[in-house]
Image (cartoon, helix red, strand yellow):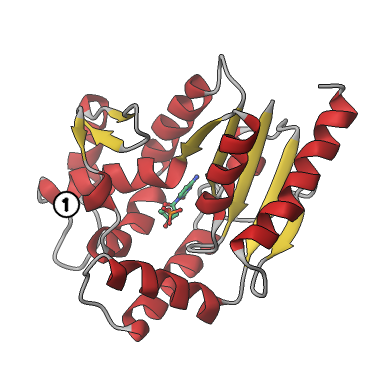
Amino acid sequence: MKIAIDGHSSCGKSTLAKQIAKHFGFTYIDTGAMYRTIALFAMRNSMINPDGSPDVNRLQEKIGDISVTFLKDGHAALNCEDVEREIRTLEVSNNVSKIAALKFVREAMVDLQRQMAQNESVVMDGRDIGTVVFPDAELKIFVTADDEVRAKRRYDELTAKGEQVTFDEVLDNLRERDLLDTTREESPLRKADDAILLDNSFMTREEQFEVAKNFVNRTMQELGI
Ligand code: DC
């Protein structure tokens, strides 16, 4: 069984996906972490031009040599190095949308995502899971929330980790990413027609999980699982 969870940046998709995976015994795959890992590779190898655009030719040459995997504890790894902490910084967030908009990057990551789900039941979160990666997913949830609510949650998360950021920086980054993600040519973020919309602006994590648990149980019942 495949569960696709898509939605805007910092809307709690990964929290929800992890809760579902743990409760139902599915494998959780964080596809945003995969794009972040590629962005980190580009940053480390001076593949970001002074104007902030990626050096497309150099990245394309190297994409075949980059290994993106998940370690046993779920941390993202770049060529076997645990980069979980580094890929969550605002600096990576500032660069990732332009990298994730590149066709060859998406093709490589989508291939990998399909391989990862070949032999197991998965909960995958991202932007194009229900529309492109698994259009046949048995359950699709599209998560969203008011952008100031999302920025506040992300700001609290970053400052708790000791990052020196302001609320406005976080809000600007989030709006910029929403814009890039929804207007790009390649697999733009959009709700699949058959996805259930879940707006969690006024929900706690627990309330959101309760709602989603009912969706999963209902789908399993329908499938006779
Ligand atoms: O979910 P996140 O914030 O970690 O995602 C990081 C970036 O990667 C975000 O700008 C959108 C992009 N992304 C994507 O284009 N497709 C996905 N399936 C997942 C993330």
> Residue 164: percent from the left, percent from the top?
20, 76
Nearer to us in this view, 50 or 65: 65
* Residues packed near mark 1 inside 10 Å, few (<14), some (14 to 19) or many (20 plus): some
60 left or right, relative to 213: left
* Residue 93 placement, left or right of 220: left
Residue 160 placement (x, y as % from top left): 30, 69
Say if residue 173 shows up in the picture. no
Q: Nearer the viewer, residue 171 or 104?
A: 171
Residue 186 or 81: which is nearer the viewer? 81
Residue 112 lies left or right of residue 62; in this view the side is right
Relative to 115, does residue 2 appear above or below in the rendering? below
Say which residue appears at 26% left-offset and 65% top-offset: 161
Q: Residue at x 30, y 56 (%)?
A: 88
* Mark 1 C-beta closer than 8 Å to ligand 1: no
Q: Can you give x and y, in whole percent of width and height, for residue 112 in the image?
A: 43, 26
Q: Quadrant of the C terminus?
A: top right
Residue 104, given in percent of the width and then of the height, sits at 38, 36
Residue that mark 1 sits on: 43
The amino acid beneath tag 1 is Met
SS under mark 1: helix
Q: Is residue 218 left or right of residue 46?
A: right
Q: Quadrant of the N terminus?
A: top right
Looking at the image, can residue 47 be seen? yes
Q: Residue at x 49, y 20 (%)?
A: 115
Q: Residue at x 17, y 40 (%)?
A: 58
Residue that lies at the very extreme toward the top in this rendered image = 119
